[in-house]
Image: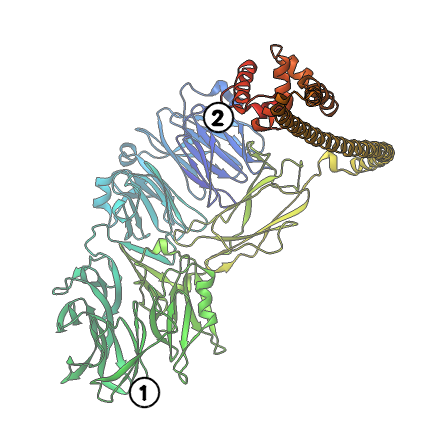
Amino acid sequence: MISQDQQHYVYFANNDGLLEFNGSTWELYASPNETIVRSVKVIGNNVYTGSYMEFGFWKRQANGKLKYTSLSNTIKSKILDDEQFWNILNYDQWVIFQSLNRIYIYDSKTGNFKIIAASNSITKSFRTKNSIYFQTINEGLFEIESGKGRLVSNNPVLKNNRIVNVFSIDEGLLIQTQLNGFYKLVGNDLSKFSTEADSQLNDSSVYSSQLLSDGSYALGTISNGIFILTKEGKIKYHIYQSKGLSNNTALSLFEDVDKNLWVGLDNGINCLNLQSPIQNFVDNTGNLGTIYTSKLYNGKLYIGTNQGLFCKEYQTDNEFKFVNGTKGQVWSLFEYDGTLFCGHDSGTFIVDDGAARNIFPKSGTWKFETVPNQKGLLLQGNYYGISVLEKVDNQWRFRNKIKGFDYSARYLEITNSLEVYVSHEYKGVFRLQLDNKLLKTGGFTTYVTPQKGKNASLTKFNNAIYYAYKEGIFKLNAKTKQFEKDKLLSSVFEKDEYTSGKLIVDNSNKIWLFSKNYIHYFSLSKLSNQLKQNVIPIPASLTNSMLGFENISQISNSDYLIGTTDGYYTMNINDLSFKNYNVSISNIATNKLNEALENRSIQENGSFKYDDNNITFSYTVPEYNKYINAEYQFLLEGFQDEWSEWSAKPTVNFKNLPSGDYAFKVRAKFANSSLDNTAIYSFSIRKPWYATTLAIFIYLILSLIVIRFIHKTYKSYYQKQKEKLIEENNLLLEIKELENEQEIMRVRNEQLSQDVDAKSRELAVSTMSLNSKNELLAFIKEDLKKTTDDGNRSIKSVISTINKNITEDDTWSVFKEAFDNADKDFLKKIKLAHPLLTPNDLRLCAYLRLNLSSKEVAPLLNISVRSVEIKRYRLRKKMDLSHEQGLVEYILAV
């Protein structure tokens, strides 16, 4: 079952519980005993429900959610075992809950109950304008009077046929049965009320019915969808699965305040916009294909598709018939001088009374244009250029192709001076100058600006030529022959995402454009020369047209047909004004970071904790139009400076809001009309405890204490730093003094080293001098010996004296003393390192220490050079030196 409240929210009895729909979002409320909700009825501000052994009402709370109150608990003992409540009705202050066995009448003022117990099972209860009726099996129709059931009629028809509904009419009652149609009950007389649908209804089994506000009857069947009959019994609509219904089993019907018909189906819920100015035809068979063009001509509606040309009598339910010979792609339909032309992939056709005749088979034809001041001629844009049609003897025929231009001319316009402008999607815009006979062009100009563009188009509107592509809409300047951007028309693409540059001018001189989320049309203002913009919020995804091939044709003064990939829409633009709905905030929820949302009161201003600062607003316009969506703008004062862009999204989330006062505002528009009201919700986010006034005062005191402490600390620190700096400076001075002393010592050592080197040189010189002296004395001695044979005593005395002066031991003693003075402790060190060295070895070491060669050492030792080399070899052995290690280097290093 379905019902609606004063806010236009719709409620559904569902297998899972109670469903609430606010136009944009669903809310599921679990039934009290977690069983299937069998019935729902909105009465006043309460939503009454009935389920298994339970009934009661739901009331809206401050946070916008419903809260359940049980009524059956007060009479629990009186409820039968396994009793389920299938229907709820109201009359004045009473609420009637009906089960299959009894009727419970609840007085909402006193809270008291009356119970009507029928002798047989109750099939269903009904309400008319002034009465409550119910039917019992095998007994007939009863009316409730004074809290009791009174038999109205026990006619066999009413006893043996299940009654679906009872309606009040002027004559009496109109009774709808499940299998046998309608009956009129006038007094005690029951008569058959025949309708056009009787034969279909008898085979379909009517399960639900509803009297609509226009006096017609909606009948829901088990297997054949929904029938809507006029009060005279004529079939107004038959809607079933092939025509858009989700399935053919309509278990409940409900008409809302907007005259939409809600249908509770065997599996799902549908809403029928019976009063919608937009209606659609869906070709579920796929025979028609994608519609590219349409035209109303001589009472027939022609549609051109990728499958060919089709037609049917306008405003009838007849099926479309294929026009023979037109198999293939139809691009355009054009009416001129009483003739209907068809631009086709196979050329050009003349269409008349559902038949077509090809008059130009040489090339595919895109479109047609009249020639200024030449009524008997037409230009047609073809796949390979432009050609001319002429009317001869009241018959149209192909005359010639215009020479000099061989490109595809899908869009072309001609001026009074016979200039032709052609838009080519891949090459850009061309300008051609035709000769007066329309035979050739003397060449053509290709425009650099504006550029070529995908889905671009060109058309003539208000005696000016316009070109549209992604970068905007450009108007031809007739004087300069250049295109200039039209700011007003181009704003369509700037504000909404570009999908197509298709421009269409209708019979009423309106220019139509298409964008991602809207259909736009501009018309001349009645009081000025300015263009007036109109926006229809129907998105491209809904019309489902081929991008770049959008098509809309004017069927009548206000009716338009829009072709789609699987059918078409008809739209009455004069009826696109809807009742003024109200936008309302449906839910407010807050949460802390990474925590669950918590619903908040909608009816009073909010005050939230500082960390409860992630806020989600849900808002809605409770309307249920299929084709036109409500759009919203919001502003959070205290956080934003400007209103947001229009969007169909019914929620917004603000994260991590800082503390402060805010006012959330939301407004809406529907069918291009702004709604009167603006929903406002004010709230504040409290400061954290550490940002309160008291906390700030405490911070100030603590800051002063900290500043005082820091001041003292810094003062002490700098005093210590000063003392440390003085100490470091003193230390540096001491280090400097030590460095100076070390420098002096180094200089002294260098001086001593120089002295040692000098003494070593002196010792070497002395040694060499001594050696030279000894050699001289030895030489003199040898000479004197030669004369000794003469026996000269004096010469022997001289030789003796020479021998005393060249005594080797004396020489060594003198050398050793001098060497020890020059190189103290060397001989001790070398002796300590090598205890096996003999005095002669030490003497050789001393000479080598002076860096004397073997030749220089030989005289000092009074031996040959060869003997010195042998001594050196033996010395190496005693010192145990390696082969690579030099003897002199080793001695010098000691």
Secondary structure found at label 1: loop
Considering only vertical position in the picture, is 691 above or below 324? above
Foreground tag (2 vs 1):
1
Residue placed most toward the observer, 667 or 297: 667
- Write down the residue under mark 2: 32
- The amino acid type, in three-letter code, at marker 1 is Ser
Residue 507 visible in the displayed image: no
Q: Residue 622: x, y in percent?
A: 48, 48
Q: Return the residue at label 1.
A: 417
256 displayed left or right of 702: left
User: Where is 546 relative to 748, above or below?
Assistant: below
Mark with earlier residue (2, 1): 2
Quadrant in which the N terminus is drawn: top left
Q: Give 213 or 485, whichever is nearer the viewer.
A: 485
37 relative position to 219: left or right: right
Q: Is residue 169 toward the left or the right of residue 771 in the image?
A: left
All told, the count of numbered labels is 2
- Disc 2 marks a residue whose amino acid type is Pro
- The relative height of residue 799 versus residue 418 in the rendered view (above or below) is above
Residue 132, image quadrant: top left
Describe residue 195's horizontal placement relative to residue 609 as left or right. left
* Percent of width and height locating residue 255: 41, 46
Classify 10 Å Cα crowding around label 2: few (below 14), some (14-19), many (20 and above).
Answer: many
* Quadrant occupied by the C terminus: top right
